[in-house]
Image (spheres, helix red, strand yellow):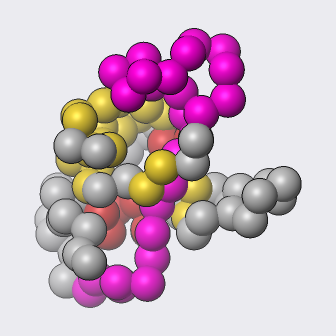
Amino acid sequence: MSERKAYDDNVRLYTDYPFVELGDTPGQPAPMREIQRVVSYDGNKYCEVFIDGVRLSLKAGYLYQDKPEPGTQPKGASIAALLQFVSKPKRG
């Protein structure tokens, strides 16, 4: 996969998917967490990410672009935003 030249520091990716590895209970709501880095994306629906220093796997549909306000529906991440994060650590 070719590296993307542009990097938008204003774009953030989040997930509220529950991970046992992060202390969540399966089937229970999990907190909204910022994605540190997208390690890989299979071009279809699965990706590997780093959250709180832990490498995890999930469906890309559970990634959201921009942190939603409490009680609002999160906005799904665009493929362009997802690809921008592949192998690029989040700055800041």
Q: Nearer the viewer, residue 34 or 37?
A: 34
Image: magenta residue range: 6-30
Image coordinates of residue 67 in percent, x first then y, are 60, 64
Residue 43 visible to the viewer: yes
* Residue farthest along the top direction in this orientation: 26
Chief secondary structure of the magenta portion: loop
Determine which quarter of the picture holds residue 91: bottom left
* Residue farthest along the right direction in this orientation: 71
Image coordinates of residue 55 in percent, x first then y, are 23, 34
Image coordinates of residue 48 in percent, x first then y, are 29, 37
Q: Measured along the vertical axis of the image, is residue 71 above or below residue 6?
A: above
Determine which quarter of the picture holds residue 46: top left
Quarter of the figure that contains the C terminus: bottom left
Instruction: Please say whether residue 15 is one of the residues in the magenta stretch.
Output: yes
Instruction: Please say whether residue 3 is one of the residues in the magenta stretch.
Output: no
Q: Residue at x 29, y 45 (%)?
A: 52
Q: Residue at x 63, y 56 (%)?
A: 76
Q: Measured along the vertical axis of the image, is residue 65 above or below residue 44?
A: below
Q: Nearer the viewer, residue 47 or 23?
A: 23
